[in-house]
Amino acid sequence: MRIELADVKANLATYIMAIISAFAITAIIISMLGKDPVVAYSFLLHEGIGTVYGFSETLLKSVPLLFCGLGLSLAFTAKFWNIGAEGQLHMGAMASSWVGLALAGTNPFLAVALAVVASFVMGAAYASVPALLKTKLRVNEVITTLLMNFVAIYFIGYLVSGPWKDPTAWELWAPTLPDYLWLPKIIPRTRIHAGLLLALACVPLTYVYLEKSIVGYKAKVIGSNPSVARYSGISIPKNILFVALLSGGLAGLAGMSEIFGVQYRLMMGFSPGFGYTAIMVSWLGRNNPIGVLLVSIFFGFLINGGEAMQRGAGVPVAVSNSLMGLILIFVLIFEVIIRRRMKIA
Amino acid sequence: MPELLSAEFLVSLGAAGVRMATPLVLAALGEIVAERSGVMNLGLEGIMTVGAFAAYVGTLYSGSFSIGLLLAILAGACFGLLMSYMSITLRCNQVVSGLSIWLFGTGVVGFIFLGTFGAVTVPKTIPTLSAIEIPLLSSIPIIGDIFFKHHILVYLSFVLVLVFWLFLFKTTYGLRITSVGENPHAADTLGINVFRIRYLCVVFGSMMAAIAGATLTFELGFFREYMVAGRGWMTIAIVIFGNWAPLRALGGALLFGLADGLQMRIGALGYFVMEYQILRTLPYLVTIAALILISRRAGGPAALGVPFERGQK
């Protein structure tokens, strides 16, 4: 991978300007809502990165984003527009919860390991449906992956309010996993769990896949020029299915990590849209694993900081979704403008 | 469940289907125009949410549906301009531009809604549009109850289907739009301003999406953050299902509206409390099934999704 200085300069300028603009506009909205943006942003900074516990919460939020974002960057590289990470995450969570509860009482390592495998397989299987529909029948995957999110979420709603409901709890959730199956905390007095390590391990794996492997190279060719891929004998259906499986599997791992590391039980609404946010994470990370890692930490900071702004300054937690969306829009806009100014394509 | 087969239930189901089809029809007409000009606006879900919220706020504070609708149209136009600027002027990837409009639209509305009204369980309500019974037609048995006892926007959507059909296929404007979406370079050589037509189509399509969102608000009488619930995405499916033509899109919208109505009516019977969550997946599954069904002959404008640049082939 050759890195041009002008490229780096253009990217840096784009991201800095986009972040500043997004924060400026959000500050205006915050004051229009009758709150103080300075107070809000100081809470964001303080509890987002200013304290050890705050930063640990930021990292905690970035774990599912990292899993899903890495997966999506694989799919997006091949221009398979998987908008369904949210559903794949839910299906992964469902499978892992089932395995965890079914194997409780057996060897805990085996139970957790099988839960990991089950979540990956289930997420991959769920992503394989739109991939097959696209390659076999040319059904638009943007719509199918997205609509399948609703199906997955409502299906889990059905499970936790019906057949899987914990009979001892008033809330609509599945039975709690026994604590010896919980992912261990890796830093004392924080909530950071071993899921972070698993997610971090996926960064170099994804990097090697994309940059050093033949399958990754094929995915890139398919994404940048499908007709070249066809003429050079690369099987587009096979490779699309392959990235879709990996992408769905990684999203499934995010579900497992949330259930075994944070929530300890399957329930409705356990994900505040991690799968949707991950779309922005992988695009802003330019489908590059290192980029995805950086953006997922930054967005984890915005999600965690959004909660802090709600607690401290009364700004609704939805501020973070708005901020992230604005950053994406501004990056898309400034990217073109700055590159035109600097006369690089 | 004797009610399921009673005439009364089937009529109420039909009426609910027509009512739920309305926002889909309105949004689909707008998206057909935009896509025929060559721009796929995937931001619909966000723009519908923005429209629904603007209509809610406008109506709540002014007490007038027209002001609410006007505010929705205005907000839709703003988002349409943003989408146009990104996808037409800057030639950004249309999929990503659309996704960014969706994510920002739903995000900023949730933010402002919760910031203004708080996380209340019972939102402030606005009056709902009252039904107008069409004289004579509404007294036809069954048909009258299903089609002719609705609020004004339902009738408007039916009329607009015809208007759009005439506009797209029987006027030179419609042909120009189609030529821009099929072969922008040829259109450009003929002196058609590709940029202007695409801008107009996308902004117009976004206004229609906002009206569709407003319809949901007027129907329910309140606003909820996630009330659009995938209808923007269903609209995009309807446009494909309808082969980019208004009449067939109407058919698709009625089909999905019926699926939506079915889950609502069965839910309202109160037999299935826990299975209701399963029923809610019905409209989404029907949409996917419909796309599979027509997949063999799906086409679309030749230049759909391709940014236009003068002098580049």
Image: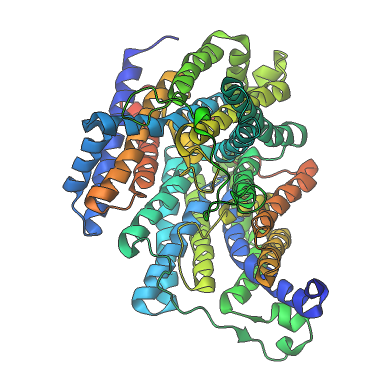
Task: Please name the residue shown 62% across and 67% down the image.
Answer: B22
Query: How many marks on residues?
Result: 0
Q: Is residue A273 above or below residue B46?
A: above
Image quadrant in which the N terminus of chain B is located: bottom right
Q: Position of residue B68 (x, y in %)?
A: 42, 72
What is the quadrant of residue A294 in the picture?
top left
What is the quadrant of residue A152 in the picture?
top right
Residue A87 in view, yes or no:
yes
Residue closest to the eye, A8 or B52:
B52
Residue closest to the eye, B32 or A340:
B32
Looking at the image, the residue that sits furthest to the front is A105
Task: Please name the residue shown 36% across and 40% down the image.
Answer: A303
Residue B176 in view, yes or no:
no
Q: Is residue A61 above or below residue B125?
A: above
Colouring chosen for the image of the structure: rainbow
Task: Please name the residue shown 33% across and 18% down the image.
Answer: A8
Q: Is residue A75 above or below residue B82?
A: above
Q: Is residue A198 left or right of residue B274?
A: left
Q: Position of residue A101 (x, y in %)?
A: 62, 35
Q: Is residue A342 left or right of residue A124?
A: left
Q: Position of residue B31 (x, y in %)?
A: 58, 54
Image quadrant in which the C terminus of chain B is located: top right
Q: Position of residue A95 (x, y in %)?
A: 63, 35
Residue closest to the eye, B152 or A160:
A160
